[in-house]
Amino acid sequence: MKISYNWLRDYLDFDAQPDELSSVLTSLGLEVEDVEEWVSVKGGMKGVVIGRVLTCEKHPDADRLSVTTVDTGGPDPLHIVCGAPNVAAGQVVAVALPGTMVFHGDEQFEIKKSKIRGQLSEGMICAEDELGLGADHEGIMVLDSNARIGMPAAEYFGITTDTVFEIGLTPNRIDCSSHFGVARDLAAFYNLRRPVRAKLPEISWFRKDRESGAIEVTVEAPEACIRYSGLTVRGIRVEPSPAWLQTRLRAIGLHPINNIVDITNFVLHETGQPLHAFDAAAITGDIVRVRHLPDKTKFVTLDGVERTLASSDLMICNRDEGMCIAGVFGGLKSGVTEATTDLFLESATFNPVSVRRTSRRHDLHTDASYRFERGTDPEMTIYALKRAAMLVKELAGGEITGDIIDLYPKPVRKAVVKYSLDRMTRLIGKEIPEETVKTILYSLDINITGEEPGILHLEIPSYRVDVTREADVTEEVLRVYGYDNIGISHEMRSMLSHTEKPDPEKIASNCSDMLAANGFCEIMCNSLSPAAWFETTGDFDVKSMVRLANPLSSDLNVMRLSLLPGMLNAIAWNINRQNSNLRLFELGYTYARKEGKGTLEITDNFSEKQILALALTGNINEKRWNAPEMSSGFFHLKGYTEMILSRFGITGKELVATMENRGWFTEGMRYAAGNLEVASFGKVSKKYLAMFDIRQEVFYAEIDRENLIR
């Protein structure tokens, strides 16, 4: 996400230079991944000054060249040879001094003091394209005769320079997906040093102009549309945006389109609230319906692509048809064009899950969907709507006809947290003064609704969807207070356990080292698998599969029930590349839904197991002059399996062996220790090998690491 340094200053008064601000942002958890200098005109016109042509004479040795003297504000006029047909004495022009880089098409070249056909040339009188202002190369640019001689051309043309931060925004910090959001976080940091607050532009003078042609709004899918606000502006002019607005958008990498679209983009990046502008003439019946359309309905989006809707896609419709995929992308028929005179502005809060599913289904990822998917602030819809309407009146004319329509049947409740200062101290290892904590909470807009000794009752602002627990508040306090301000305690607090508990990470590392020492290579496979693979084999409990609500593709739509398909896929991949002698292992998780439990949304309904999988195929040793080849076999795998078990302290005397009758083995064995199954291994059946087009024997083992630890 790109954030403009100049734009930030519209909402917060600060003195920090860009390099310091970059460090502050990163310390607040808004990691700055890149910083770049931006200028509104390429090259920034460095080294170009305003000059006046004093004399202009024909070049004695070239018909198409002129020899001029130019006053650039220095002690002596410059001699410049110019090839433009329109150069004349008395003109005020832009002059590139020696050392300046100017443009020739997409390339740059340096101006040097030189002789042209025997005449000294100490600079260049510039055309529009050479300055980076446009494409015109018919002649030099002739400027206003009142321009101050010697002034930098960048100052004359009002060239804007800016610093743009590329912030790697984490998914939970959607509140900082705008310039005001970032300014608000910076204000919390600087407020510990001096009283300061981030402020949005004033909108108190917002008023409707008259009552005319009201548009009705109905929300027929309230579960997918939390809040819907809108208003109508009539009599507008669609035209290019003014320079200041185009500069703001270009600085963060957006391409200006027209004043209406640019205003909606500007307000989005100012407040974080997505807006949509409809041509009011396209709203047949003067009614906006927020609803679902029948499955397989065709809809053409703004990019001219016809898309097939699902019945779960939320749509903004008129009386007869869809106009916009809610929160994702507008429709071609209802978009703003140069002929638009009446406008309906939408500002809404949509269900994040609904927008996420629709966005992924249609592979449409927009600035609006990015924010709606993560949760926008329902309290910002009205401000953003008024702000946009006022900018429309300022930049496009028109009148606001009617009151704001605001449908918000079930207001979102703000999270409340009972916050213990003692627990905070124990958690972070340092006592922060209570008044400092309160100052930080105030600067974060966290309202203290009540107090008890050592306890604060807090109300979290609606835009902080990620702060719901006591630990979240502690993280916020620590983030603003500064991790660097938490020193290392001189006290050591520890607990001595009477029973030695195995370290899972150490065990995994030991197993990996042991297998690697025996010629195994570790692989890591995707934990997502195609459901069809498990369903067609008939050997897995498909009812226990954990299905993804929003899969990226049909090949990655369930969490894996076994490591076997990933292992076979890796073996097939290697065999196809002439690597047929393999010893592989993977330490990974399998996932299942618990039998008889509730809905998919409840985390406790699922289980995961960590499994160590081994596979052998091809020759167990390479061909040598003094020893024959030996193919991998059942007993080789049995030996490796028992080697792993012995590392866990389980010897052959403790193992109970039974035949393994699972469908993926033709010859298999199962080991149990006590009442727990610890391993199963065998020769993979031809049916499974055929699914991956493997034509050589494969031996496979699964070791339940969690049962071993028990």
Image (spheres, helix red, strand yellow):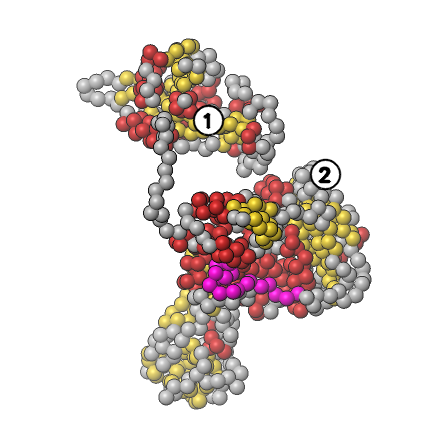
Main SS type for the magenta part?
A: loop
| Residue drawn 39% across the image and 22% down it | 708
**On the image, which quarter does residue 273 sit in?**
bottom right
Asked whether the viewer can see residue 43, the reply is yes
| Residue drawn 59% across the image and 25% down it | 597
Q: Amino acid at mark 2?
A: Pro
Tell me: 119 left or right of 405. Answer: left
Question: Magenta stretch?
Answer: 187-203
Report the Cα–Cα distance between label 1 and label 2. 41 Å
Disc 1: which residue? 609
Check residue 571 for magenta coloring: no
Number of callouts:
2
Q: Compare marks 1 and 2 and give the one earlier in the sequence.
A: 2
Above or below 487: residue 19:
below
SS category of the residue bearing label 1: strand
Check residue 200 for magenta coloring: yes
Tell me the number on the disc at residue 235. none
